[in-house]
Image (cartoon, rainbow, N blue to C red):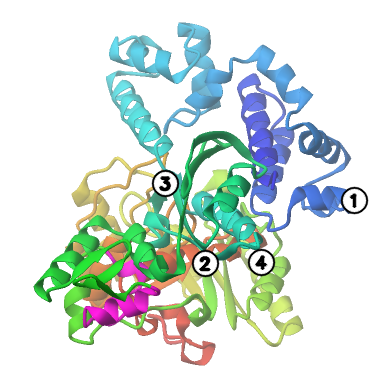
Amino acid sequence: MKNRIVAEIFKDIAQMLEIKGENHFRIRAYERASQNIDSLPDDVELLAKEDKLKDIPGIGKDLEEKMREIISTGRLKYLDELKKEIPEGLLQMLDVPGIGPKTAKVLYEKLDIQDIVMLERMAHAGKIRELPGMGEKTEENILAGIDIVKKGRERLDLRTAMDIAESFVSKLEKIKEVKKADAAGSLRRVKETVRDIDILVSSKEPGKVMDAFTGFDGVKDVLAKGPAKSSIRTNDNIQVDVRVVEAESYGAALMYFTGSKEHNIKLRQIAIKKGLKLNEYGIFKGEKRIAGKTEEEMYKALELSYIEPELREDRGEFEASAQGNLPDLVKLSDIKGDLHAHSTWSDGSSSIEEMVIKAKELGYEYIAITDHSQSLKIAGGLDNHTLELKRKEIERLGNKYKDIKVLFGAEVDINSKGEMDYPDDVLKEMDIVIGAIHAGFKQSKEVITKRIIKACENKYVHIVAHPTGRLWGSRDAYDIDFQEVFKAARDTNTVFEINSFPQRLDLNDINARMAKDSRVKIAINTDSHTAEQMDMMRFGVAVARRAWLEKKDVLNTATFNKLKLKKTMF
């Protein structure tokens, strides 16, 4: 699929046009097109062949022609022309938190800074603080942001890793000599970021598998090719390793290469105590292999219940397995609705009706449309008058779609004092209120903790969204006293969110498990800005599973009739 290539090119164009100071509406057109294409479940190449590119929201004749050029050549002449006017390194600088197009333009014009390397040097040299409107703190923030970008480039976000792995697994499964194929490593444990991709294959003819794998479309370089293991680099410079084993050892190898290292060490220790030998080929008693075909028989041979991959971090899973107390982990099929979604009424790209239709396709009983509140101007936050118009639209759609509940709500900004962006008399009229911090990220731990606690204490706030504010690869989480925050949430019956957006996944698994242990309810939401993004629920569920969450721990596994929030209207 070339969706991501097209989306990235349109995103680059939008940023270059902003650096040039072009018309805002033109910039926004490219931004929305990029967002919609990146969220698209369909392959743009197939849509082009079927002459359906203009069916994508935001794609008119001009952008359709540009998409066809990218799909056929992998490039766009218009972008190449823009790059002659603007150094490509300026785009990389925009990845640094706090540097927008206007700042990048000033740094380029005043200090001739054209890339991140030069940016880092100038910050260390104290040159940036000399510019008007900037200072020593600006330099410190830039250097901290560069560190975040460097870390982000070392790993893949979960969505990217899954998309690539699923593509390769699908191709491998079509090879007649392949019996099974599974992603392994940290991706199978569904860690929030992944360094590279490991795939395990069961086959009696590994040579044919290696020949096919190294010859797949999208393979840029063959890094190594052996009789049973090969490594390639994709066109996106991502490493994928494939290893082939026989069926008798497939379960043992899958367990071994799934990890984690700590989990595997504990497994070997348990085996040794039982007089057994455990390795990637199986469990042996003397020379006889007594288990190896499946993971289930591997655990059984060690007198353990099967441990789900997400739990394999040596965080108490062995003790729970031995005692029969492993959690019945929440599943994607348990989710009954999405309680955090945006529409075109604020900064979304899909109408409320399109979001409702998608929710129905997913089999949901309810969906909450929670557009941004008034102070978040950059995201098209709604004032009181527009909010009332939106309510009427939701009521209209509620009457039209009788088999799903459309909830009227808002993602309401928690200001620097912990106050909500709408007054209580407005909040109390909503079906659902989601509190969120969107500014003041650099405040102290104590101040941010107090802001969130005060939001919990508001009797109309149901959920606190993306509680640590982190954006993977661009913004670190702000510091919070979770012990105090979760105490307040428990006392006020406030729900905390696992945000399923791959760049957020916030709460993370550690904090979500702490919430569970503190008896704080969790909502798994997508924070979708397009209908297609509602499919990202699976990433939030993955975090919940790593956090040992069960169906009973998650608010939106409840049917609508049993949905209970802090307000009693449900």
Q: Which residue in the structure is indicated by mark 1? A: 51
Q: Going by the picture, which residue comes out furthest to the bottom?
A: 561
Magenta stretch in the rendered image:
293-312
Looking at the picture, which amino acid does disc 1 mark?
Asp
Q: Secondary structure at mark 4?
A: helix
- In depth, the one of 327 and 473 nearer the eye is 327
Which numbered dot is residue 537? 2
Q: Which residue in the structure is indicated by mark 3? A: 471
Task: Quote the CA–CA distance across marks 4 and 3.
Answer: 29 Å
Task: Quote the CA–CA distance across marks 2 and 3.
Answer: 17 Å
Count neighbours of disc 1 (C-alpha within 10 A) and say few if under 14, some if 14 to 19, many if 20 or more: few
Task: Quote the CA–CA distance across marks 2 and 1.
Answer: 30 Å
Q: Which residue in the structure is indicated by mark 4? A: 390
Looking at the picture, which amino acid does disc 2 mark?
Met
On the image, the x and y values in percent for residue 255 come to 34, 65
Q: Secondary structure at mark 1?
A: loop
Observer able to see residue 155: yes
Observer able to see residue 462: no
Name the residue at 66% across, 18% down.
83
Which of discs 2 and 3 lies nearer the camera? The answer is 2
Looking at the picture, which amino acid does disc 3 mark?
Leu
Determine if the magenta segment contains residue 300: yes
- In depth, the one of 203 and 21 nearer the eye is 203
Q: Are marks 4 and 2 in contact (CB under 8 Å)?
A: no
Task: Quote the CA–CA distance across marks 1 and 4.
Answer: 34 Å
